[in-house]
Structures are given as C-alpha cells and as structure tokens.
Amino acid sequence: MITDQQVDFIEKAIAESNVKSRELRDDLLDHMCCLVEMEIKKGLSFEQAYQKAFLQTSPNGYGEIQNETLFLLNYNKIMNMKRLTYIVGFIFSLVFTAGFAFKMLHWPGATVLLTSGLGGLAFLFVPLLLINKFKGAVHSVLSEKMKWVTGSLVLLLMAVGYYFKVNHWPGANIMMLSSMVMLGFGFLPFLFFRMYKQSVEEL
C-alpha cells in the first residue's frame, strides 16, 4: 500500500498540471495510485514506480489527458467543423477555377465567378481553416502560427485588391503590391523555415 504522503505527492503533481476538471483529476489520481502501488509490489521504490506510471499514462504531461478527453467529448463538433471547412474550400476553389476558365474563353460571368471564388476563399475558407489549425497543439510553435497568419493576410489583401481593381477603385495597386511584399518577406520565409525544421526533425 502507498502512504498518505505519497498519495498527497501524486495529488499535488496533478493539481499543478493543466487539468482543470475536478472529476478528471480524481479519476487520474485513482488511476495513478493503482499503477504506482502495482509497481511498488514488484519491488520498485516509490520514485521509480511513480516515474514509470507517469510515462505509461501521460509521457507528455497530465495536460494531454485533458486534451484527449476534450477531443473525445467534442469529436462530432470538431469533425463537422473540419468537413464544413474543406467543403467551403473546395466549392470556392471550384468557383474561382471556373471563373479563370471563363476569363480565358472570354465568356460572360467570368468576373463574377473570379470575385466570388476569391472572396469566398479569403473571407470564409481562410478564417475557418485558421480556427481549425490554431486549435491543434502543433501550432503552439510561433513560426507555424506566423506562417498561417501571414499567409491569410496575403490572401485577404489579394482578394480585396483584386476586387478594387475590377471596380477601378483607388488603392487597388497599393493593396496588390502590399500582398506581394508580405508574400515575399512574410509568408515565404516562415513557410520555408518550417519546411526546413520539419525536414531536420525527420532525420
């Protein structure tokens, strides 16, 4: 049997983690105490038993248990959000592609299709995509966040600049030029830096 002091040690470690739910903390405490007790019966010291139980349960910290629990509880909402995001992206990409084809063939409606497609991608697809991406733990990396933020701003500026250009409004060239500058000195450096980091991590 583990002592009350050892139980208090485990409880304190869980309380100091990112686990917010009281019920989850209690369940996690019971689970950890059972695992530690089993390992102590095999001859390990408390410290060794706790370390082994911790690595078996949550090698990346107790917070991952909460994240996995929240994911399972919200699985349907998350999947519906992802479906909506990629359906919207597909539809407006198709509209933009059709507009480009109409423009090349000099068919009527090309401008409407191009504007609708680009506007939908910029103002519907990109925000939905950002919401999905920033919910992922992988995007705690600053360079990854900056890649998505700068890429989104580039697309938004391009969309607004194109709309201004089509309507012959002032400021179109400035917005288009700004988007190109941001693409070259904002998005692309972060994109290739992340590609480099990922290639190094795969070695």
Image (cartoon, rainbow, N blue to C red):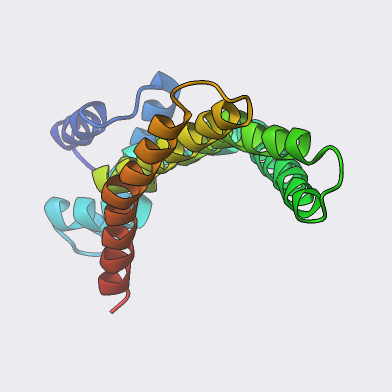
Tell me residue 87's x, y (percent): 74, 42
Residue 166, by quadrant, is: top right
Instruction: Point out the image quarter for the C terminus.
Output: bottom left
Residue 76, by quadrant, is: top right
Left or right of 107 on screen, residue 187: left
Q: Is residue 34 in view from this perspective?
A: no
Q: Nearer the viewer, residue 4 or 192?
A: 192
Tell me residue 181's x, y (percent): 31, 44
Q: Residue at x 52, y 37 (%)?
A: 132
Left or right of 110 on screen, residue 201: left
Instruction: Point out the image quarter for the N terminus.
Output: top left
Q: Is residue 133 in view from this perspective?
A: yes
Residue 16, by quadrant, is: top left
**Label total for image:** 0
Left or right of 101 on screen, residue 22: left
Tell me residue 159's x, y (percent): 55, 34
Q: Residue at x 26, y 49 (%)?
A: 185
Q: Residue at x 27, y 68 (%)?
A: 196
Q: Nearer the viewer, residue 72 or 40?
A: 72
Q: Residue at x 42, y 43 (%)?
A: 151
Reply above or below: 194 against 114: below
Reply above or below: 62 against 46: above
Tell me residue 99's x, y (percent): 76, 45
Q: Residue furthest right?
A: 108
Left or right of 43 on screen, residue 76: right
Q: Nearer the viewer, residue 55 or 150?
A: 150
